[in-house]
Amino acid sequence: MSVVPIEDPRDHRYALAAEGLLRQFNEAGVLEAADVHVAERLCDLAQERDPLVALAVAVTVRAIRGGSVCVDLTTVAEDSLVEDLPWPLPDAWLAALAASPLTSESEGGATVLRLLEGRLLYLDRYWREEEQVCADLLARPARVPLGEADAAALEVSLGRVFPARGYDEQRAAARIALSQGTTVLTGGPGTGKTTTVAALLALLVEQAEVAGRPPPRIALAAPTGKAAARLQQAVEDEVAKLPADDKRRLTGLRAMTLHRLLGSRPDSSTRFRHHRDNRLPHEVVVVDETSMVSLTMMARLVESVRPETRLILVGDPHQLTSVEAGAVLADLVEGLGARADVQIAALRTSHRFGESIRQLAEAVREEQTDRAVELLRAGGEHIELVDDTDVVPRLRELLLPHAAGLVKAAEAGDTADALAALDRQRLLCAHRDGPHGVHHWNRQVERWLGEETGQPLWTKWYPGRPLLVTANDYGLGVYNGDTGVVVRRPSGVLRAAVAGSTQQHDLAPSRLGQVETMHAMTIHKSQGSQADQVVVMLPPPESRLLTRELFYTALTRARKKVVVVGTEDDVRAAIGRRAVRATGLRQRLAAESGRESAP
């Protein structure tokens, strides 16, 4: 997280009443007001007066805001990037915590803080969620036995669903998934994850038919509406390529958001209708874009899946993690990968991109900085680097024709073309605010449209306004991440056409509550989507959001061309900085390698 000293006494990050260590760390920009207030409140409730404990609570809350689920007390001082602060010595800090009522497990007391391995400090909720995810995953059957005759039949079936040459990785991944109760299927864009999933589902249905069982109930889910819509379309496309009998076996598959799968409740954002005492009815559950799943959501998912259900978690561990706390997919890959009783199904060869985009993405992922810069400098049909002193003219050339075409289709009432245009180009930014942020570039594109048409956009709703839904609305059936566009009907009435995860919605704009203009969007929000051409706006090197995972995620949104807007220094800073989150899940999973799985 960024660290900026707080100088203005009216700054919203400044905790006016803070004293002692909390005040010092707040004024230095290490802590914000929210961190201080939570720490003070919890210490007051527990009658805890030790400033070391208050500081421990505050830095733990700060870590959660940054996406970590805990804080490493032995390294937090080194990671703070601020010198001359009175960080406690680890031994003294741990002694103060051990004596605190906030870590007490006495009867009637509320344990607020938890320690793992004597160095990782958690708030109790996240400690429990990690413990639960680890226990639930390891309690599931690790192996699904397959007889000799069945194994021979499987090889014949694999040859049927993977008839073409060059599918060795997919066949191997399918074998792994068919032999395990829980499978993590990883791979970058274009490596054939959906191809593998479709074929795998056909094989599972076939196995049920051969055994005389009813076909398994299959759930397809993703974290956002847009990711679910992409999963739906991708699975349909791959199923269409299968032999006729396999197509028949997989009719009627529908993807949905994880919130919808688990059953949202109006009284809670973290609890659902399906849980440990009301399990999901499905025999197979596939979750796509698992890198976007937070620790809390993973805890709710694994407790809701029946032990005998096959759970298949699909994603790319090199992409950005959830905007909420946790780095679950990366933890599963490393933690389960360290065990002898579990195999990770990994796909490595990309078939989607032009060769240059594939090489650039691999160079970024593998931290080959010089190679990435060389590819960007070379440019070509599929790669462009915009590093001019003034990038505005080139960006106008890139962005205005697309925005103008969107307005033209929307004014003509051509909903299909307007929605299709959304996926032809996407401007991606790391920040929301500032000169490199989404808000600035949304306004800039609208100004260019006004200049081009001679009609300044003075209203919120105008034909061709691209929309991004930012919150779930279960009544309307639209979900966070869904995209749409405002279209003028022949009657002159404006309507919002939204491409949902299961259907296209035609809505009055006034019914849409939480939506944003989407001439530009954040890279985080772009996960689960793709566009023919992607324009990536890199912030300067001092931005703490500029990381290798962010750059890789942005590059891999492109189907045909990627335009990187930034200097060589920006590129080098991005590749050289990893988005590190403190978690304990991978250690828990690896440490429990001796535990016996449930039968």
Image (cartoon, helix red, strand yellow):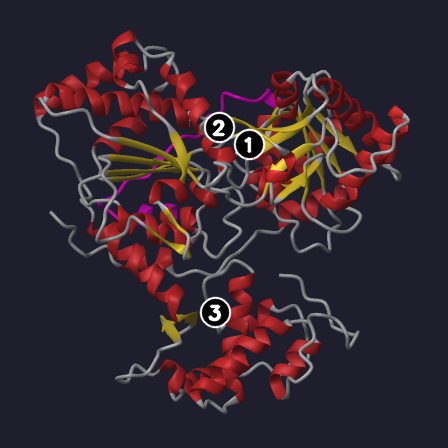
Amino acid type, mark 2:
Arg
Closer to the camera: disc 3 or disc 1? 1
Q: Which residue is mark 3?
A: 72
CA separation in Å, label 3 and label 1: 34 Å
Location of residue 377 (image quadrant): top right
Q: Nearer the viewer, residue 149 or 466?
A: 466
Q: Considering the image in quadrants, where does the N terminus appear?
A: bottom right
Quick one: SS at disc 2? helix
Q: Three-letter amino acid code at disc 1?
A: Ser
Disc 1: which residue: 529
Q: Is residue 137 above or below residue 83?
A: above
Up-down relation of residue 91 to residue 166 (above or below) = below
Left or right? Give the position of 387 relative to 483: right
Whichever of labels 2 and 3 marks the residue nearer the N terminus, that label is: 3
Does residue 222 sit above or below 415 in this rendering?
Answer: below
Residue sitting at 76 percent across and 19 percent down?
408
- Quarter holding residue 534: top right
Q: Tell me, yes or no, whether the highlighted magenta stretch contains residue 343.
A: yes
- Residue 494 locus on image (x, y percent): 69, 27
**Front position among marks 2 and 3:** 2
What separation in Å lies between label 1 and label 2 (alpha carbons)?
A: 7 Å
153 vs 210, nearest the viewer: 210
Secondary structure category for the residue under label 1: loop
